[in-house]
Amino acid sequence: MSNPRVLSDAYIPELPNRYSGKVRENYDLPDGRRIIIATDRISAFDVILTSIPFKGEILTQIARYWFEETADICPNHVLDYPDPNVVVGTRLEILPVEIVVRGYLAGTTSTSILTKYRNGERTMYGTTLPDGLRANEKLREAIITPTSKAFDGNHDEPLSEAEILSQGLLTPEQWQTVSTYALQLFARGQWRAAERGLILADTKYEFGVDKDGTIVLADEIHTPDSSRYWIAASYQQALESGARPESFDKDFIRSWVSAQCDPYKDPIPSIPDEIVEQASRVYARAYEAITGRAFVPDLSGDTVLDRIRGNLKRYF
C-alpha cells in the first residue's frame, strides 16, 4: 500500500499544459504564470531513484527561505506559494546553461571537478587548478563550472565561458549578468550557512528570461538537492583523514547507490525502505539546520495530492 504522505506523482487533469520533469510537475497557465509542484521523487545519475516522504515540501520551503533571503541580489520567478509543495511563478524562457558554483574540490558525478581532478585533469571549465589539492579541500576562490542545460533526458555537458560565447548559448551581456548574480548568491549562501554551522560547498543556479528580457533566477536555490552542504564542526577532521565530510544533501542517496553499483553502467538497485526513511529524516534535519526553524509537515488532506488539489482549485 502506498504511503498517503508521499507525493510520487502530481497529475492534476484540470490544470493545462502539463510538463513533467524528473522531480517537478509544471502547468502553464494562459496568463503567463507557471504552477510548479515539487513531488517527493529524487533524481540522481540522470534517473529517478525513488520517492522520499516530505522531500517536496521541505525543498519548496527551503527554496522559499533562500528566495526571500536573496531577493535584494537579483529578481526571482516567485509570485505565490498556494501550498507547501507548490510555487506559482512567472513563466520564463530558461537559459540553456546551468551555472554551477564550486567553493571546494568536491563531487561524485562525472562532471564534478573532483572526479575530473582525480582523472588527472587540471584545466576544466576554463579554469586551471593547481596540483596537490586534497579531496574536498577549499579552493582559493569560488569558481563557476557551467554545464549545458539538458532537456528531454539528455546529459549535462561541461562548458567554459569561451564555449558558451562561441556557441551563442548566451550573449556576453547575459553571461556577465548570470555569472555576477551566481557569485553574489553563492557568497550570500556561504555567509548565511556559516552562521548556522554549515559549509555551502557548491550549488547550481538556473536563470531564465522573462517577456521583457530581464534575467530572472528560476527553479530552486540552495536546497539540499541543488547544493552540497557540510557540517562545519567536523569538516577539518574529515579533510585531514581523507573521509567524506559529514553532510545532509543528496550525496547521502548518491553514495549509497555508488557503493552498490556503477550507476552510469549498471542497473540501479531498489533502495531499501530504511534508507528512504533515513533520507527523509536527513531532509528534515537539513530544513531545520538551514533555516533555524522546526519542520512541521502539513498533514491536512487525505493525501498530499488531495491537499494540493484543494489549494489549487482557484486555478482550475
Image: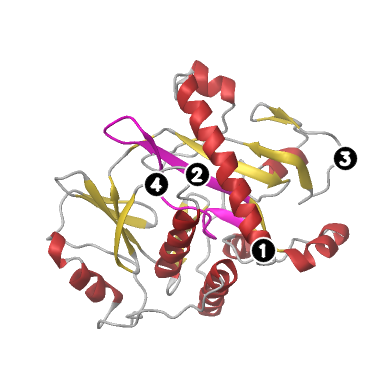
Measured Cα–Cα span from mark 4 to mark 3 = 39 Å
Measured Cα–Cα span from mark 3 to mark 2 = 35 Å
Secondary structure at badge 4 equals loop
Q: Are marks 4 and 3 in contact (CB under 8 Å)?
A: no
Residue displayed at 20% across by 43% down: 32
Reading the image, the residue beneath label 4 is 76
Q: Is residue 160 or residue 32 the one in the foreground?
A: 32
Q: Are marks 1 and 4 in contact (CB under 8 Å)?
A: no
On the picture, is 140 further left or further right than 110?
right
Q: Are marks 3 and 1 in contact (CB under 8 Å)?
A: no
In the image, residue 153 sits, relative to residue 11, either above or below, namely above
Question: Magenta part of the protein: which range?
Answer: 202-228
Earlier-in-chain disc, 1 versus 4:
4
Earlier-in-chain disc, 4 versus 3:
4
Whether residue 100 can be seen here = no
* Three-letter residue code for mark 2: Ile
* Mark sitting on residue 73: 2
Whether residue 123 can be seen here = yes
Q: Is residue 34 or residue 16 the one in the foreground?
A: 34
* Three-letter residue code for mark 4: Asn
